[in-house]
Amino acid sequence: MKRLLPAPWLSLALWLLWLVLNLSVSPGNLLLGALLGFLAPLLMAPLRPLPIRIRRPGVIIRLFFVVGRDVIVSNLQVAWGVLICGSRPPRSRFVKIPLDLRDPNGLAALSMITTVVPGTIWSELALDRSILLLHVFDLEDEAPFIEHFKTTYERPLMEIFE
């Protein structure tokens, strides 16, 4: 049954969404919605992420607040850097960060965190997932930044996912 209908709740949701978007429960829409709900999960099954096994749920809460704090502080730093850019241009650079995190779900979470924190942009991940290329808006010294990144984001995600 799982091979025929890999995600029954998703199938039901897609079918209902089709009916709501079309504002009709005509036989044609019922059939098309059912077909969509049946085929979409079957065709997308290879793209579904691996099951997540969270090892330390308490770390998630701590990481949530750390990321929230960093978002606020980084917003203020980037705003200040933009305001004073006439007197001192930002020292933008690309930083190569060696990664110990290998879990695909952890890497996805790390990419989202990096995208949310202003002043950093996830640029590239090496094919073997060992090095992350990160663009930083204003950076004076790489070594403290790399240590902060690994300590603040990567290590908690390793505790959660690995």
Image: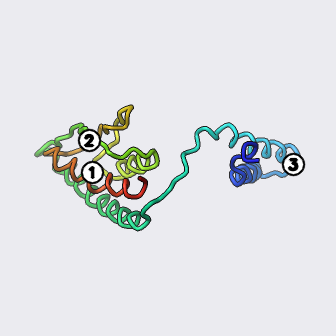
Q: Residue furthest right?
A: 27
Q: Which residue is mark 2?
A: 97
Q: Which mark lies nearer to you, 2 or 3?
A: 2
Q: Residue furthest top?
A: 127
Give the mark nearest the N terminus, 1 or 3: 3
User: How many neighbours does mark 3 have within 10 angstroms: few (below 14), some (14-19), or many (20 or more)?
Assistant: few
Residue at position x 35%, y 49% in the image: 114
Q: Which residue is mark 3?
A: 26
Find residue 116 and report its horizontal and vertical position in percent.
37, 52
Find numbered disc 2 in the image and state the secondary structure of the residue it sits on: strand
User: Please, what is the three-letter code of the amino acid marked with disc 2?
Assistant: Ile
Instruction: State yes or no: discs 2 and 1 in contact (Cβ < 8 Å).
Output: yes
**Gap between marks 2 and 3, in whole Å?**
56 Å
Find residue 44 and report its horizontal and vertical position in percent.
64, 39
- Which of the labelled discs sits on residue 150, or is there none? 1
Relative horizontal placement of residue 27, taking residue 63 as reference (left or right): right
Q: Is residue 135 above or below residue 59?
A: above
Find residue 117 and report its horizontal and vertical position in percent.
33, 52
Instruction: State yes or no: discs 1 and 3 in contact (Cβ < 8 Å).
Output: no
